[in-house]
Amino acid sequence: MYDVVIIGSGPAGYTAALYTSRAFLKTLILSGMQPGGQLTTTTEVENYPGFPKGITGPQLMIDMQAQVVRFGTEIKQERVKKIEKNNSGFVVSTEGATYEAKTVIVATGAEAMYLGIDSEKKLAGKGVSACATCDGFFYRGKEVVVVGGGDTAMEEANFLTTFATKVTIIHRREEFRASPIMLERAHKNPKISFLVNKTILEVVGDTAVSGVKIKDNASGKEEVVPAQGFFLAIGHKPSTDFLQGFLPLDKKGYVVVHGLQRPGDYHTATGVPGIFAAGDCVDYQYRQAVVAAGMGCMAALDVQKYLETR
């Protein structure tokens, strides 16, 4: 029987474990098959506090893991299949085992959606990114491409003009899902240009992005757009499929938490008492490591208070 089982091993999960284990709560992290989450695919992290020279994403996750292990957190590299209630709390089932817990923190994160082309994977971290806020700084004085047609694409394109000399938004349709005000803002930005009704065939480059090969959907004409950065803004998918029917999720699959609705509420509480959630599986807006870590801390403090009252 664990005081808390934490599902996920990104900044939210590790920070939650740091607080619960230091509070002498018996803590288990079920890390999934990719310990460390999305940051393990990020080369340089320069916006996480405390690292004036920056740090690689994988190293940051290794250090976080070592810190929680130091305070007694157990970690098992297993993927959770389901959570069920029982008389003493919850049963968390993985593909090969079951674990009993008084409380659960869901910190499974979210995955950026990709186009699914081979060159995209090949150049991941070498010019291909799904986070302009994280990586935009590295493209100062360069030309970049943003893929997408929603508010996120417009927002990220505008943000990237702070650094890049030119930003080209490529969209597969003529119409945009973006709100009129966001679309107008992008159109008015002199650094942003648009290529619509285009299909992306390939991200061009051997060791780094040098361009994007596209095809016109009407004429079939192919061309290469010069670019040193390729930013995807076609959405994120929270890793919450296993929670369907058990926890309240919004229409996009993000876990719904109470927030500060009334004084004394648990900010990270879900619709099932004893289950809390933090990080990118909750946060569809900011999607930053430092925000996820802060939410992990909040979830851990909520768990401590919840257990104390019982």
Image: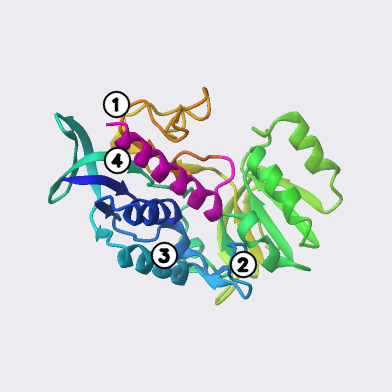
Which residue carries the number 3 mark? Answer: 64
In the image, residue 49 sits, relative to residue 100, either above or below, namely below
- Is residue 298 shown to the viewer in this render? yes
Pick the front one: 146 or 64: 64
Image quarter in which the C terminus is found? top left
- Expressed as whole percent of the image width and height from the top left, the position of residue 178 reads 68, 34
Q: Quadrant of residue 72?
A: bottom left
Q: Earlier in the sequence, mark 3 or mark 1?
A: 3
For badge 1, the amino acid type reads Gly
Q: Circle 2 sits in a helix, a strand or a loop, which is it?
A: loop
Q: Main secondary structure of the magenta part?
A: helix
Mark nearest the camera among 3 and 1 is: 3
- Expressed as whole percent of the image width and height from the top left, the position of residue 228 reads 67, 68
Tags 2 and 4 touching, CB below 8 Å: no
Image quarter in which the N terminus is found? top left
Queried whether the magenta region covers residue 240, the answer comes back as no
